[in-house]
Image (spheres, coloured by chain):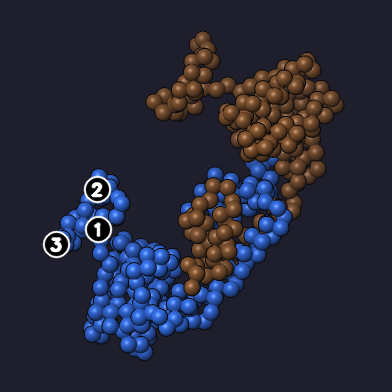
Chain colours: A blue, B brown
Amino acid sequence: MSEYIEPIERLADMFRRLEGVGKKSALRMAFSVLDMSEESAREFAEAVIAAKTQIKLCSVCQNISVNDVCDLCSSHKRDKSVICVVEDSRAVMAIEKSAIYNGLYHVLHGAISPMHGVGPDKLKIKELLTRLNSEEVSEIIVATNPTVEGEATAMYISKLITPLGIKVSRIANGVPVGGDLEYADEVTLRRAIEGRRTI
Amino acid sequence: MSEYIEPIERLADMFRRLEGVGKKSALRMAFSVLDMSEESAREFAEAVIAAKTQIKLCSVCQNISVNDVCDLCSSHKRDKSVICVVEDSRAVMAIEKSAIYNGLYHVLHGAISPMHGVGPDKLKIKELLTRLNSEEVSEIIVATNPTVEGEATAMYISKLITPLGIKVSRIANGVPVGGDLEYADEVTLRRAIEGRRTI
């Protein structure tokens, strides 16, 4: 016999396709499905299909949305003169949670990575330029991830947009609040010191 | 607006119902589904339903199976005189992987835990006794987990079966192979020393 019976093996394979799920976790999850009621398993299956079929990209900011224009873009309470550029929808959620920002967003769906064959044309940069033509924007805050790819993307966007007379800023690097200096890497510490402010 | 759009929220809630999945992981997995092709999402949904509907319990050993009697119980190559009693199907898989054991199994589907209202009647112990009446069994190896509940279950089974003239044994406690003594807890170390063998 094979190691596991076929339906479990198949389901575990599916879980493994999800980001960050290893072999053991996938198997544990597959067994969890067996412990569910048949009703719950059906709900689960439907939620997978629904997420995939009901969600599209907002025609303005390219964030995921159930409507053609997302709630953030169609809100009258947001400051439409600032656009925060992020790599993915999760970054939008993270910033929204912090409740510090009241402008709009633009989701690139990735970052420039020549290593992985991702050039600027694969990102939603064209859509961002279109917005800048039609909307009155005074500042672009580039909040791509603090990685090599995210920095490269930030540089690219800055070079593209600064000539249009729009201010382009980048979120600060530094030690995370609640973190321990001992565990901060050298590059982060250097940035934290370079970016020091008078108190 | 709510923090996340509804279909993502709903799917993440489903992932959270799985064992060992926290809020952040559930959300990451839900976003992974969005990255899948529609074809893959459908396959995923079908695998959930299939696992739940096709898998039943083997009428002999109570392990999960696609047939009425599982492959292990119906195999002619297994030693039918020994039954290894385990808490769940994952334990069967783990022991099978070790390839050290050639007998049959019996899956209890839990362990005695008065704290959680799990008495012996909630486990597949009655089914084990039925097997002992109809099969020629010479030894029961109790391989429940090395936890308070697992030990209590092992004691219960031993008291129940030893009077029937069947040998009941318990798997050994000790330091795991490849582990470091420094990280072994006191109880494990004590058991490892008590269970020492001449070499």
Say few, some or many: other residues with alpha carbon within 10 Å of mark 2 (under 14 / 14 to 19 / 20 or more).
few
The amino acid marked with disc number 2 is Leu
Chain ID, mark 2:
A
The amino acid marked with disc number 1 is Gly
| Residue behind mark 3 | A198
Q: Earlier in the sequence, mark 3 or mark 1?
A: 1
Q: Is residue B198 left or right of residue A92?
A: right
Circles 3 and 1 in contact, beta carbons < 8 Å: no
Kindly give the residue lying farthest to the bottom in the view shown. A134
Tell me residue A105's x, y (percent).
38, 75
Residue shown at 29%/55% (left/top)?
A176
Q: Is residue B49 left or right of residue A63?
A: right
Gap in angstroms between the C-alphas marked 3 and 1:
15 Å
> The residue tagged with tag 1: helix, strand or loop?
loop
Q: Earlier in the sequence, mark 2 or mark 3?
A: 2
Circles 2 and 3 in contact, beta carbons < 8 Å: no
Gap in angstroms between the C-alphas marked 2 and 3:
19 Å
> The residue tagged with tag 2: helix, strand or loop?
helix
Q: Is A68 placed above or below B10 here?
A: below
Residue shown at 85%/26% (left/top)?
B134
Q: Is residue A116 left or right of residue A183?
A: right
The amino acid marked with disc number 3 is Thr
How many marks the image carries: the answer is 3
Q: Nearer the viewer, residue B66 or B5?
A: B5
| Residue behind mark 1 | A174
Say few, some or many: other residues with alpha carbon within 10 Å of mark 3 (under 14 / 14 to 19 / 20 or more).
few
Circles 1 and 2 in contact, beta carbons < 8 Å: no
| Residue behind mark 2 | A181
Q: Earlier in the sequence, mark 1 or mark 2?
A: 1
Chain ID, mark 1:
A
